[in-house]
Amino acid sequence: MNAKFWNQHTETMPRAKLDALHLHRLQALCHYAYERSAFYRRKFDDAKLKPADIRTLEDFKRKLPLTDKSEFIDQQLSNPPYGPTLALPEDLVVHHCETSGTTGKPLGIPYSMYDTLRYGESWVYGMWALGIRPSDSFYFAFGWGNFAGFWSTYWAARRLGCKVISGGGLDTKGHINAIMRLKPTVLISTPTFALRMAAVAAEMGIDMSKSSIRFTYHAGEPGPTALPAMREQIEKAWGAKAGELLGIAEIDAFAPGCPEGDGVHVNEMNVFTWSMDAESGNEVAEGEIGENIITSYVNSAQPLLNYRSHDLVRRRASCACGRTWTKLEGAVLGRTDFMVTVRGTNVYQTAVENLIGEMPEVSNSYELVLTREEDNDAMTVKFEPKKSVPADMWWEISKRLSDKIHQGLHVRLRCEAVAPDTLPRYELKTKRIIDQRPKEFRRALDR
Amino acid sequence: MEERIRKIRQARALLAEAMQGCELPQIEARLRNADMELHWALWNLGEPVPLRPELG
């Protein structure tokens, strides 16, 4: 129980050996996907490529076409629930999750039993490094739904052998009362909800820094490793060590937090990653910022090869913590498509803009204003109605736009009509995002 | 480490034998789960095993 690593053998494996393993596993994965998934067979065929053509890691990065979430969604919509993306018989799918659908339609994620074990265990590396042990007890401060992040945390607790206490269905005060009554030692929540809970507890006269919680562990939005100010706030509010991992619902909880506190490490037993210049498509060198391209070994039901994450990262080959697994310094530094997390929901600039564009009364002059309210990021849509729209209709249009966004993206944004010709005009690229959040709560590239 | 890996491989071979012709669904399921865990152990020792346990 005093071991520093969950698996020192692989977490500190020399790079040459890791790369040899990656090549072997990627070659096997190419054969697997080609033989079992109509989606990948067509991908390979369109590129005039056979799995045997992948002889080096460079071949894999350069020759194999990229994949993107939208392709999978299109395939699934054409033949629900999974279409030709499925690589296993459907009776081997034991769990279904979905992405939140904030880019448009949700992506269905099928898992085999083996996939769920491996996905869950991905969390454990970071939990172990933080100091969490099988004798700890987890409090889950969320509802379950179809979100992979929540379910995979549960799978993680099972893999580690910890007690699980579900707070599903309770409101914030209910969570606080349950924690005080049941005395768990680990809080699992989004980072902002951890802060919210501590604030509500203070209103109730309860100091959560004196509670039984010794660790908080987070995912779902920029947290303690990406935002040092967030770490300080959470650790002070809860009197606990705060950890985080980087995961993507359809891939894996693939990057456990570094105990050094300034980034995450790619779990190189579960995924292979490289960084790409999003403009040129070329690989970028260590230390340069590029889009994280991910291939998962653990999604055997719906393989993901050379998958575009749209996350901008900076890779480092070594770390003071001793892990040889690639470090993503500061976790996610930004997005190729701007995204902000509002009350736990990822909101993409393009998705909001698409919905605004569907409102015939709204002109092309609008801004998305980001602020920080009650420990959460908030977005306000400021828009100019078309000049033909009378002013006494503006309130109704604002409400309809807010409802439309709520229906489409599952998050309620404030929408404010302003008089025509009052928002700034730009000669070159129009500035849509007006970020008024304190700098310490913005991702590095958004500052 | 080599000795541990050798023993895990032996255990998988024994499980395969035990699964052959097993007529009790409960026991067959448990043996399959055990094999899955051993496959995962080999994977996480850096052994070049197939992607899924039933593939080899």
Image: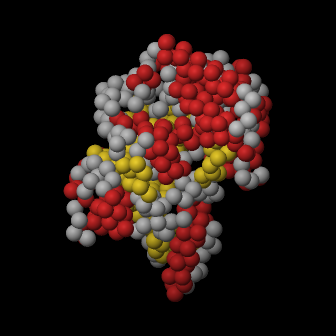
In the image, residue A66 sits, relative to residue A24, either above or below, namely below
- Left or right, A138 with respect to A335, comes to left
| Colouring rule applied to residues | secondary structure
Is residue A439 left or right of A382 when viewed as pictured? left
Residue at image point 43% right, 21% down: A9
Q: x and y percent of residue A203 in the render?
A: 25, 70
Looking at this view, is B51 or B20 the one in front? Answer: B20
The part of the image, by quadrant, that contains residue A30 is: top right
Can the viewer see residue A158 in this picture? yes
Between A280 and A274, the one nearer to me in the picture: A274
Residue drawn at the location 50% of the way across and 82% of the way down: A395
- Position of residue A68 measured from the top left corner of the image (x, y, whole percent): 63, 43
Residue A401, x across and y down, in percent: 55, 73
Asked whether, in this view, residue B36 is left or right of residue A31, the answer is: left
Instruction: Confirm whether residue A63 shows in the render.
Output: no
How many numbered tags mark residues here? Answer: 0
Residue A240, horizontal then vertical, whole percent: 26, 48
On-image quarter of the N terminus of chain A: top left
The answer to which image quadrant residue A56 occupies is top right
What residue do we see at 40% from left, 45% from top?
A162
Identify the residue at the far bottom of this view.
Answer: A392
Q: Is residue A206 above or below residue B23?
A: below
Residue at 43%, 41% in the rendered image: A161
- Where is residue A364, by image quadrant? bottom right
